[in-house]
Amino acid sequence: MKKNNKISNKPSILLLLSILFLFTGCRKEEIDIFPNSPAERLNQAMSTYEDVLISAENGWKMEYYANTQGGGYTLLMKFDASGLVTIASRSLLTKNATYEQDSSLYEVIADNGPVLTFNTFNQVLHVFSNPEHPEILDPHEEGYLIGYGWQGDYEFIIKEAVEDTVWLKGKKYGAEITMTKLAPEIQWQTYLDELGDMDKMLFHMDVPMLTLKVDDVFYRIYKGRFHVFEIKKTDKESQKVPFIVTPTGIQFYQPIELNGVVFRNFELNLTKTRLVSVEHPDYAIRCTNDLAEFIQNNPKEFSWRFASELSGNEFKNLYNRISSAVLTAYEGEQLALNLEYSTNANSFVLVISYLKENKKVKGSLNLNMAFDEQDVLSISYANSGDNNGLKFYNEIDGVDELVVSVLTADFELSTGSKLNPWLIKFENLNDYTSFFQLERQVKN
């Protein structure tokens, strides 16, 4: 019996030896795949990524998102071998909303993988990571907390880098960011100024209600000034959608699905009245086709400031006359003229206001307004107003001329884009040298 036991153990020993040889073979195979240590591989990746960054002779376009909920902004960057980076941009967030450029230091460092860090202050980039509350932002703006700023990153995990594209991820806030190599012929300031002009035309202020009809469902679109839309299907169903302005329109941070249709890129059409879906050209974001109708149909939401500084000489000179007369007659300063709807008068009115001893004094004169043709508005003085308005009419030099001569006419209306008509030009149909401009304001 003992002899038989010895014979029966041999297959078990052979099986065990076979398994050991098999594991040894696998171990050797793993070592062959990774001939370098993790530290060596990391150093090699860092060196490769830095070479890619430096290789772009005209720099990179970064589509920067502070975080996954915030709007996108275009930054241009040029890296050199000495560790210097030059960054430029133009938006509402740059100084005076004009082209701004600054240089600082950068480094590709090791931190659980290659990380691109901008480790000295740069005015263009670090505005996003500064915890101070931005002056441009209303302290009560939903979604932004005092003491956190724009909640943006200045250090980025390098996910991948090839010759003409670098993919990054914000180290703290996690936004996905793409950098693409700029063509040699692109002039930085020209490119950013054209992009800034598109941004200003469409989003100088929050949009009025826009609409996007997807088959049988209407979506309402609000906000946009800081490159975040609020898209509502109903009052209880809404989502915030970050986007970035492109040379031809806008691009959402991520594709979104509305009524079964996926959208991401939109291009402004030639007449600047619609943002047309690139993926699905049958769908478009719209606002209005008729500026006269737009003014008449939004009486409760908006007031319109007469922008004398942007108007023709006739209006500008008349405004200055009225301003001087208010100062002489009432010691009033900071004259303001507004077109708005009055529920008391049940009509649109010209509001004349000024400050005296830090108190606002105002009066109004009633106007008749009608529109029969697209983008044509007829205005006339209704020979009535409130007590202060009639007092101003009789006592202030130039007010009678303003309402009887300048405002009583048929006007052709035009704007930069009917998607967001925030500045409308009124040209007298009988005298195109006579014009004024109205700037849209949200009623308090």
Image: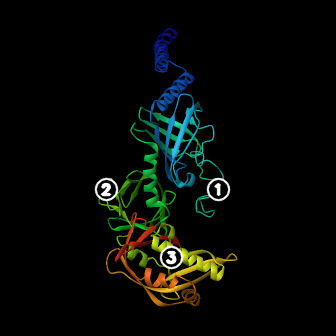
The picture places residue 388, in percent across and down from the top left corner, at 59, 87
What's the amino acid at mark 2? Answer: His
> In the displayed structure, does residue 15 sit left or right of residue 376?
right
Residue at which label 1 appears: 133
Q: Which mark is residue 198?
A: none
Q: Secondary structure at mark 3?
A: helix
Query: Pointer 1: residues within 10 angstroms few (<14), some, or many (20+)?
Result: some
The picture places residue 344, in percent across and down from the top left corner, at 53, 88
- Work out which residue is located at the far left of the displayed protein and give it: 282
Residue at which label 3 appears: 318
Residue at which label 2 appears: 280
The picture places residue 152, in percent across and down from the top left corner, at 58, 48
Viewer-side residue, 4 vs 75: 75
Distance Cα–Cα, label 3 vs label 1: 40 Å
Q: Tell me which numbered mark, 3 or 2, is placed earlier along the sequence.
A: 2
> In the displayed structure, does residue 267 sit left or right of residue 72?
left
Kindly identify the residue that appears in the image at 55 percent across and 83 percent down: 397
